[in-house]
Amino acid sequence: MQKRERDWWKRAVIYQVYPRSFCDSNGDGIGDIPGIIRKLDYLKSLGVDAIWLSPFYCSPQADNGYDISDYRDVDPIFGTMADLEELIAEADRRGIGIVPDLVLNHTSDEHEWFKKAKSSRTDPCHDYYIWRDGKEGVLPDNKRAAFGGPAWEWVPEVQQYYYHHFAVKQPDLNWQNPEVREMLYDMIRFWVEKGVAGFRLDVVDSFGKEIDRDIFQNGPMLHPYIREMRQKAFIRDDLLTVGEAWSVNLESARLYGNPDGSELSMAFSFEHLMLDVAEGNDRWHPIPLRFRNLKKTMAKWQNGLVGCGWNTLFWENHDVPRIVSRFGDDGRYRAESAKMLAAVLFGMQGTLYIYQGQELGMTNVAYPIEEYRDVSTLNFYEEAGREGWPEEKRMAAIHAQSRDNARSPMQWDDSPQAGFTSGKPWMRVNPNYREINAAAQTGDPESVFSAYKELIRLRKEYPVITEGTFELLLPEHDAVFAYRRTLGSRAVGNRMGTSGEGGMGIGSGTGEEILVVANFYGETIPDPLAEEEKGMEVLFRNYADEGTKGVLRPYEAVWYCSR
Ligand code: GLC
Ligand code: CA
């Protein structure tokens, strides 16, 4: 197995695979582990260091695997344990780590633990879950589940309700029970011993919930639990551990990502992806992007964790829409805007995460409701219907925000079903696969894929990107996203007003500076930074030619470097 440095993940590029939609090897219409193995060389060519692997465990698939019925085995639809071991070994041969998803907030209602728990109040597993007495038909209170409907479900056998933050088939584990935690830690060690490179922790911020006090995230016991888990379960020092934390702020990010290694490597903050939906992160009420807030939010996180935490950089995952459809233009300027969005993000400090298909500029889908599969989308459709939302408004919200936007099958080539499967895909392939697919892009130097590859290469070549300071430029400009990264004596000079020696880790006196300038919109505009750019070298541009000096074309983005 690869020997990794303790903080290898700081320079790493992580690629998220959603197994069900990635590559189907046996024609049953569902992506699988042998399919992932086939595509390892593709990922290697992109420059990927590790794969975040969404759940492949045994599961009734009520939430596409985020409802686990056996943490220690592979679901037959995805393959076998032998396939998984082969994936770990084959990835390792290419220098790629496997980072499985860990879903510890809840299990499936078909997990052995829950089957026992619901059989009798005296079963030792009963207290593994969260129960309230009550009467059938009279809910304990009016708590709502994140996927719609009440958070309580009645179990006649025990004459009690269990709590589920997500779908009915995802009962929440009782983290206050030390035995539950020990069982989970033991399971995590099982996977560490299999040679994984780390873990992504699903909804980590809810582990310390105290529902009677209406505390659903960031409970008082959250960080003590994570520290306990770090000690007992994350038994290797080089594991990448990243928590999904919709509620994280700078203060808690400094705990999750404490550089002393007492908790996790880092946490996903979603603040930048809440700026085009209504207050309260209500995804079903999309609003136009608050662009200046986006810049300020990114800058706040860039500057807020220096030396006391670590950032995650991402535009997409399996729960959010495609970024090119969301913040870019998935029509006329699809390729330009997809590359621009990459150029803006990839120059920042943090660990970079790319979601499958993002590197091709894959777009949202817009299907009739029958084609949607996601439990939260379907629940929303029903519920909003009952609340009287007109059909058109419901479908507009779904087209903009459904999680299935990210879950349509990966577009490999222009053969039927985009080369994803030889059978009937579990979800319809986006009809634009004939133009947007990997085969068409890997050999084309002007493709979105090639831009991703080049930006990844530059990220690794320039230490300033991992280590330099960040300065947002033109915060009030309403179309340009620009910032400067500085390393070495230049950084010291900038910060202290002197030209001292040394600085951020490279002993040389010259330093290094990268300037990122991007037009975030589709109009041609004057380049407000033309003066600054003089004398700098172009490292990357998302247009083939130089264009006119002093002007930024639609979605034009450039990386400049000090000479
Ligand atoms: C996380 C996952 C999401 C899942 C939910 C419940 O948010 O990313 O896909 O539905 O947790 O496990
Ligand atoms: Ca399959």
Image: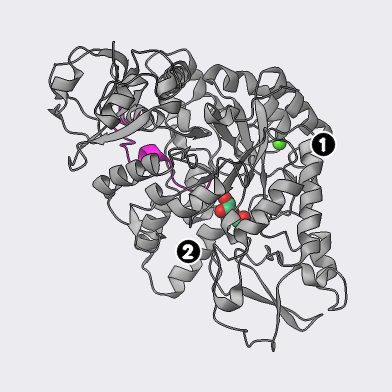
Which disc, if any, is residue 81? 1
x then y, percent, for residue 352: 49, 32
Q: Nearer the viewer, residue 491 or 113?
A: 491
Name the image quarter holding residue 284.
bottom left
Instruction: Please identify, in this view, whether the residue under mark 2 or under mark 1 is nearer the observer.
Output: 1
Name the image quarter holding residue 238.
top right
Q: What colour scheme has been applied to the protein in the rendered image?
A: one colour
x then y, percent, for residue 156: 77, 81
The quadrant of the rendering that contains the N terminus is: top right
Within 10 angstroms of label 2, few (less than 14), some, or many (20 or more) residues?
Answer: many
Can residue 110 be seen here? The reply is no
- What's drawn in magenta, residue-wise? 318-336
Helix, strand or loop at mark 1 = helix
At horizontal 63% and vertical 88% (from top left) the residue drawn is 138
Helix, strand or loop at mark 2 = helix
Q: Quadrant of ligand 2?
A: top right
Q: The residue under label 2 is which amino acid type?
A: Tyr
Q: Nearer the viewer, residue 326 or 227?
A: 227
Q: Nearer the viewer, residue 503 or 156?
A: 503
User: Are the residues at dot 2 and dot 1 in contact (C-beta closer than 8 Å)?
Assistant: no
x then y, percent, for residue 69: 77, 55
Residue that badge 2 annotates: 381
Type of secondary structure dominating the magenta stretch: loop
At horizontal 80% and vertical 48% (from top left) the residue drawn is 187
At horizontal 15% and vertical 29% (from top left) the residue drawn is 524
